[in-house]
Amino acid sequence: MTVTHDGDAGVPGSLAKVLADVTAERMAQDALWGMQALPDGTGGEHRTAESDRARDETEAAARRGALTWRHVLVEEVLEALAESDPVRLRAELIQVAAVAVKWSQALDRRT
């Protein structure tokens, strides 16, 4: 009997597999680029306007029954880019990562 855990998106072991893939990619990035200390480059009124437009587009697509993973991920990314507070930015980036993981799981479910 195969057990599906919360977060497995209908594919047993899916969450652990995607997170292992993310870990491997992060290790490869560190090997290639080393420790990077870059500014965030987020915040500002233009970023907030972009985020608002993405949210409106996502909501409109959902109302039409045409919502895609692209809509959801772009909305989350633009919400993160609009945020200048480090604590809130981190929370938004976690949401971006969670959506990317879930989209990856959806791809795994289809293949």
Image (spheres, rainbow, N blue to C red):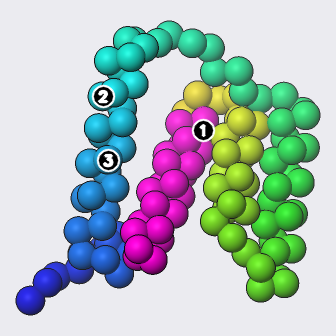
C-alpha span from label 1 to label 3: 26 Å
Which mark is first along the chain, 1 or 2? 2
Image quadrant where residue 8 sits:
bottom left
Give the mark, 1 or 3, whose residue is nearer the N terminus: 3
Mark 1, residue position: 88
List x then y, in percent, for residue 33.
42, 14
Residue 21 tag number: 3
Vertical placement of 65 versus 16: above or below?
Answer: below
Q: Residues within 10 Å of mark 3 (few under 14, many from 20)?
A: few
The Cα atoms of the two marked residues, 2 and 3, are separated by 10 Å
Label disc, if present, on residue 27 of the rendered structure: 2
Q: What amino acid type should be assigned to the residue bearing mark 3?
A: Asp
Q: Quadrant of the N terminus?
A: bottom left
Residue at image position (46%, 61%) is 104
Q: Quadrant of residue 67?
A: bottom right
Instruction: Tell me: 66 left or right of 50.
Output: left
Q: Which residues are magenta?
A: 88-111
110 or 9, which lies in front?
110
Return the x and y of residue 102 as percentages of the image width and height: 47, 63
Q: Of the residues shown, which amino acid type is indicated by label 1?
A: Arg
Circle 1 Cα neighbour tier, 10 Å, few/some/many (<14 / 14–19 / ≥20): few
